[in-house]
Image (spheres, helix red, strand yellow):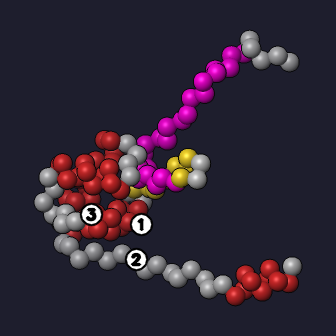
Amino acid sequence: MFATAVRLMAKKPKPKMKPIELNTSPEKTQTISRAIFEVVKEHGPLTIAETWDHVKGAGLIGLSSKRHMKILMRWMRERQRLRKICNHDGLHKQFLYTTWFTKPQKTISSTPTTPNSIKP
């Protein structure tokens, strides 16, 4: 038990993340963030790559690169316009971005239970 306490105390704490400061003008930031929000809202939970494909297809002028889009999406998460969910599939994790207003898709079981099939 003492060794565990020493090991935990020896670890450095996670550094505090400062708020993201965008270099683009507020008007351009608002235009780009609205477009990203509409893409995520329309096409459901998306990965970064899928979001980038949809945004490129929309022909957004102010967005310069995928890195710029990722920074904007992190900024939108900070302001709670988007949320990030983790989809586990065994050892594989997939991070999806969705809006706060969409309900998560529920998995439907293959064998539905009815009140008559339950035995007391």
Amino acid on which the number 2 mark rests in the picture: Pro
Please report the bounds of the magenta region as a residue range: 93-115
Residue 100: x and y in percent read: 43, 50
Quarter of the rendering occupied by the N terminus:
bottom right
Mark 2: which secondary structure? loop
The residue mark sitting in front, 3 or 1, is: 3
Residue 50: x and y in percent read: 32, 50
Q: Which residue is mark 2?
A: 19
Q: Which residue is mark 1?
A: 78
Q: Magenta span has 84? A: no
Residue 95: x and y in percent read: 46, 55
Q: Which residue is mark 3?
A: 66
Residue under the image location 37 percent in, 42 percent down: 44
The vertical placement of 42 against 61, above or below, is: above
> Mark 2–mark 1 contact, CB under 8 Å?
yes
Q: How far apart are the alpha carbons under marks 3 and 2?
A: 20 Å
Lower sequence index among marks 2 and 1: 2
